Image (spheres, rainbow, N blue to C red):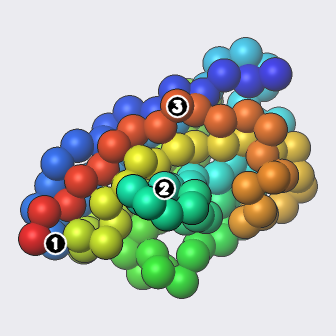
Amino acid sequence: QVQLQESGGGLVQAGGSLRLSCAASGRTFSSYTMGWFRQAPGKEREFVAAISRNGDNTNYADSVKGRFTISRDNARDTAYLHMNSLKPEDTAVYSCAATTAAVPVTWLGAHAYWGQGTQVTVSS
């Protein structure tokens, strides 16, 4: 199995940027397709972005397309979420997750391993 730890969250003004990191340990990181999800207060957890094992295939929620970029560095066992043009509605706890699926998937249930999450707060 793999253990995941997010970092990089914080408070940022609208229009600003943040980069989240997801460090993996345990089983070979490159064996997993990775995803980012978020949960805002009072709302269900939702899909944000996903990336294939070798990074050549990505998938994004419509709400973040053109603003967020998911990437990974298999040599460093780390996935990233680069967030630009942040909006107050992006405020949430962001979690990374790992799945053995062969392609990036949006379904939460497909991801067996989760980090504890990092808070992102965007002020207006």
Position in image of residue 76 (x %, y %): 55, 28
Is 78 placed above or below 111 here? above
Towards the viewer: 116 or 19: 116
How far across and how far down the image is residue 52, in percent?
A: 74, 56
Local secondary structure at mark 2: strand
For numbered disc 1, what is the local secondary structure? loop
Mark toward the start of the polypeptide (3 vs 2): 2
Dot 3, how many residues are within 10 Å of its Cα: few (below 14), some (14-19), or many (20+)? Answer: few
Name the spot of residue 29 as percent of width and height, x first: 72, 31
> Residue at left 66%, top 43%?
97
Q: Which residue is mark 2?
A: 39
Q: Amino acid at mark 1?
A: Gly
Can you tell which quarter of the image residue 59 is in? bottom right
Left or right placement of residue 7 versus residue 5 in this view: left
Which residue: 80% across, 38% down?
112
Which of the two discs, 1 and 2, labels the residue nearer the N terminus? 1
Q: Is residue 49 visible?
A: no
Instruction: Give the distance between the C-alpha atoms of the residues marked 1 and 2, in whole angstroms.
Output: 20 Å
- The answer to whether residue 23 is above or below residue 61 is above
19 relative position to 38: left or right: left
Q: Residues within 10 Å of mark 1 (few under 14, many from 20)?
A: some
In the rendered image, which residue does mark 3 sit on?
116
In front: mark 3 or mark 1? 3
Q: Amino acid at mark 3?
A: Gln
Query: According to the image, label 1 marks what residue?
Result: 15
Q: CA distance from mark 3 to mark 1?
A: 26 Å
Of badges 1 and 2, nearer the viewer stands 2
The quarter of the picture where the N terminus appears is top right
Q: Residue at x 78, y 46 (%)?
A: 111
